[in-house]
Amino acid sequence: MKKTVFAAAAMLGALALVATGCAGNTAPGAGGNGGGGDLIKVGFAQTGSESGWRAANTESMKKAFSKENGFELIFNAADNKQEAQISAVRNFINQSVDAIVIAPITVDGWDDVLKEAKDAGIPVILEDRTVSASDDLYASWVGLDFEQEGRTAGEWVKENFDGKGANLVVLEGTTGSSAALDRATGFNEAIKGTDVKVLDSQTGDFTRDGGKKVMEGYLQKYGKDINVLFAHNDDMGLGALDAIKAAGLTPGKDIQIVTIDAVKDGMTALANGEFNFIVECNPLLGEKAAELVTSVVDGKTVEKRTIVEDQSFTQEQAAEVLDSRPY
């Protein structure tokens, strides 16, 4: 099966490439925190539960940070509200955890609380998304190359629609999030210089309901002029499917759909011909995050940034691998 793999060589030389497996494997070095076998107490500030991708990511983190692997996990989901997430981090600091893991909702606004954690001597690992704060305020980041994900989606659109009069609409992720910002940058870079026309671009907040509502508005405004949709994640694309069908159009044919994530529901839509192309965003970051936490608690030096492998799928490729996908 032909797959597109994003090579770490496209990043800075210091980036480490890590392929995560299905969660449940023992994190390397877990329990080796110098505490005589004591559990490593970790606070994890998750964004919320906005999508199928996020559910798979949360499950991966919980399995990796299990007691069996040498951790005591304090979990908080912020319902996609940054103020709640920052409050959770401050609570972790007050509880004197050994380390904090954050999947930051947006890139800005983290300087103060990260400094508070640093002043308290608590290392912070960023997971999935990034922040604009100085990188000396956190120990490491593990996640995906969002910009390359957007670029790969844009390259597919360019290859299939340049010179064919494409009218495209975009469903953006959460405003201010690194995933939305970087995917837009990569996508726009890829279609630059083509005759692909972007009719509109609005946030669906990475949710299925948000994608449906925004797509309904697009269809009312532009109708059958739309022939391509780029959604920053599968869930928004799946919400758009409902809106497209309700408008009497056929998803995958009348409007071709490109998304990012490759969760089970998205891959099913792709295999069934309702999506046309998906760029994977691997949610199984727990094992590597646990490895990083163990290392920094032990006082070891770790890579500042770790990129996890992604791939992309056509309809035919999705049909081949659907049954074997872990998420």
Image (tube, rainbow, N blue to C red):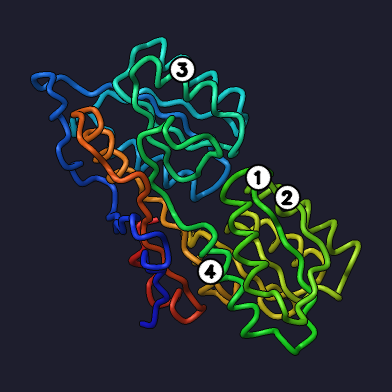
Residue lying at 39% horizontally and 82% vertically, measured from the top left: 2
What amino acid type is highlighted by mark number 2?
Thr
The answer to which of marks 2 and 3 sits earlier in the sequence is 3
Residue at the bottom extreme? 163
| Residue at x 83% of width, y 67% of height | 199
Instruction: Name which residue type carries label 4.
Output: Ile
For mark 3, give the secondary structure: helix
Q: CA distance from mark 4 to mark 1?
A: 19 Å
Residue kind at label 1, given as amino acid type = Thr
Q: Please report whichever mark, 1 or 2, sits nearer to the chain's N-terminal start.
A: 1
Residue 39 at what x, y percent from top left? 19, 22
Task: Tell me the number on the disc at residue 116.
Answer: 3
Alpha-carbon distance for marks 1 and 2? 6 Å
Compared with 147, 2 (above or below) is below
User: Quick check: can you spot residue 322?
Assistant: no
Q: Secondary structure at mark 1?
A: loop
In this rendering, which labeled residue sits more in front, label 4 or label 1?
A: 1
Query: Relative to 125, is 269 above or below?
Result: below
User: CB atoms at circles 4 and 3 under 8 Å apart?
Assistant: no
Quarter of the image with the N terminus is bottom left
- Mark in the foreground, 2 or 3: 3
Task: Give the image quarter of residue 79.
Answer: top right
Image coordinates for residue 63, horizontal then vertical, percent: 29, 39
Q: Which residue is mark 4?
A: 278
Q: Which residue is mark 1?
A: 174
Image point 39% across, 32% down: which residue?
101
The disc, 4 or 3, on the residue closer to the chain's N-terminal end is 3
